[in-house]
Image (cartoon, rainbow, N blue to C red):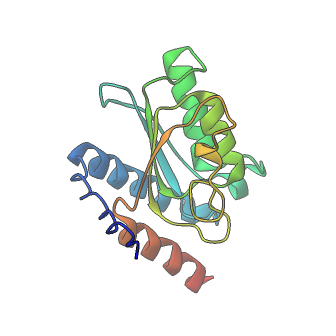
Amino acid sequence: MHLAPPPVPDPVPEPVPDLWRDAMRLALGEAAAAVPAGDVPVGAVVLSPAGDVLARAHNEREATGDPSAHAEVLALRRAAAATGAWRLTGCTLVVTLEPCVMCAGALVQSRIARVVYGADDEKAGAAGSLWDLVRDRRLNHRPEVVRGVLGEECAQRLTAFFRDR
């Protein structure tokens, strides 16, 4: 009789750095700024490799009539303008909602090092929930993904927005 080896336990998650929690709080503030224009409350912050805030943004699709005006894309554009380079090597994007396919593609193209997000998006998430575009082994760049930072607070903000609509 051959017995299977015992299952390997999941590694104990490392504590979430205060820097990511602080940046998520900034992103939540950005998310709140989207609501007056009727935009879905999603906010994003780009951190430099040293942890400085390079850019921040919130959804502006309703405000601008631009279908690509997601918080992540706008934050990436602003970070690129701030650094003078499209490659955001070593930078971290902190966003309140798991990126969609469009945003995930922009993250890969920007060469961002890490994506930290709050709430999972079971309907359109492309960083592990529905698809995992950002970590697809066929792509030339795969950022690290950290999920669930202030996830409850991020999810509650979205739930309240859609409930009130």
Question: Which residue is at 51% across, 79% downward?
Answer: 159
Give residue 118's position: percent from left, percent from top.
43, 60
Please state which of residues 156 and 126 is positioned toward the viewer in this rendering: 126
Q: Residue furthest bottom?
A: 163
Above-or-below relation of 98 to 133: below
Q: Is residue 41 left or right of residue 10?
A: right
Q: Is residue 17 left or right of residue 38?
A: left
Question: Which residue is at 26% across, 56% downward?
Answer: 13
Please state which of residues 56 and 127 is positioned toward the viewer in this rendering: 127
Q: Residue furthest top?
A: 84
Q: How many marks?
A: 0
Question: Which residue is at 51% across, 38% downward?
Answer: 143
Please say whether residue 69 is visible from this viewpoint. no
Question: Which residue is at 31% across, 69% downward?
Answer: 6
Which corner quadrant holds the N terminus?
Answer: bottom left
Q: Is residue 87 left or right of residue 18?
A: right
Give residue 48's position: percent from left, percent from top.
38, 27
Give residue 157's position: percent from left, percent from top.
45, 72
Q: Quadrant of residue 165?
A: bottom right
Please state which of residues 136 and 88 is positioned toward the viewer in this rendering: 136
Please say whether residue 68 is visible from this viewpoint. yes
